[in-house]
Every structure is written in C-alpha cells, then in structure tokens.
Image (spheres, rainbow, N blue to C red):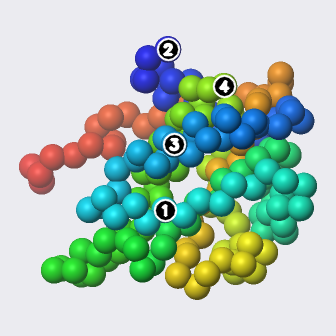
Amino acid sequence: MDLMQLMQERYSCRKFEERPVGRDVIERILEAGRVAPTAHNEQPQRILVIDEKETLAALDRCTKCRFGAPAALLVCYDKTACWHRARYDNAPSGEVDVGIVTTHMMLMAASLGVGTTWVMHFDPAAVRTEFSLPENFVPTAILVMGYPAADAAPAPAHSEKKAMDELVFDNKF
C-alpha cells in the first residue's frame, strides 16, 4: 500500500480485539516517533507505554476515550527540552513536535495493522497525578491502540472532507 492510500484508509478505531499489542510491534511504533522531525531537532517528546492492567486502569481514570484498547501511548513534551521561537514571541515547539511525533506513530501503527485513535479528551491534572509526571512534562496526546475488532468501522463523517479551495488560500485578497 502506498502512503497516500494508507492515509486515506486509516481511521480512528474505537473498537478493538482483546489481544495485546506485542512489545516488538510497540517498539516499531515508538521508533517511528523517535525518527520524527522536531523543531531544531531538540526531540522533547517523552512517551509512556501503557499496556499493563494497572496502567490501563489508571488511564481509564483520566479519560473515557480508551474504547477498550489494550495499549496506549501517553505523549508528552518536556518544557525544558523543546525549542522556543525566542527572537519573536518565545512560543515553545512542544505541542507541534508532539503532533508530528504522534502522527508518525499513528501512521506506522496503521501500516502494521494496528488501529489507533488520537485522544485529546483527557484530564491533564489526572494524567499528571496517575502517572506521576514530572512538572516539566506536558501531557499532550494519548494514542490508544490495538487490533481493530472485526466489526470496527470509521465514524460516519470520516470520509467527509472539505474541498481543497476551502482549506488552501493564496494572498490575493
């Protein structure tokens, strides 16, 4: 499958088989995140693998959006390790970096037959407490993952895409 086809066919999976995602598969997914580009190559991502009964229960106390997935990746950035646009507004790159890293991992998972859903609907304070995150780690995304159930399907609006001219503009106002 070529990359465009993979991106078009990948969907947010909300129904999973009970079988675990093997550590070898998780390591391949993590490697995709490790090689992702980050601002100034600072690599501020900090990723927690959640695939044990106790840690999955802790995750359930932070979000209702696990959907029974047997594994998840908590993707944070380290505030002390990310690049800042210092000369202008000092904006940190952490959230953008996590977005790139998480996208790489999500696409790698899809290429390995692992379904994912990118979850942003979670309580950051609960995540910080449940997983004893250091103060400098900012929880940004949760990538729940597992093998799609036989009856898993994209949400009805999955294939509804805006026209290109609604999304792309030029400076001829």
Which residue is the site of mark 1? 45
Of the residues under marks 2 and 3, which one precedes in the sequence? 2
Q: List x then y, in percent, for residue 120.
A: 62, 60
Whether residue 47 is visible: yes
Disc 1 vs disc 2: which is toward the camera?
1
Answer above or below: position of 102 versus 7: below
> Mark 1 or mark 2: which comes first in sequence?
2
Amino acid at circle 2: Met
Three-letter code, disc 3: Glu
Q: Nearer the viewer, residue 9 or 126?
A: 126
Furthest residue toward front: 24
- Mark 4 to mark 3 CA distance (whole Å): 16 Å
Residue located beneath label 2 in the image: 1
x and y, in percent, of residue 138 in the image: 55, 74
Mark 1 or mark 4: name the one nearer the start of the chain.
Answer: 1
Position above or below: 86 against 63: below
Whole-angstrom CA distance, mark 1 to mark 2, is: 29 Å
**Mark 4 = which residue?**
113
Q: Residue at x 40, y 61 (%)?
A: 43
Residue 116 visible, this angle: no
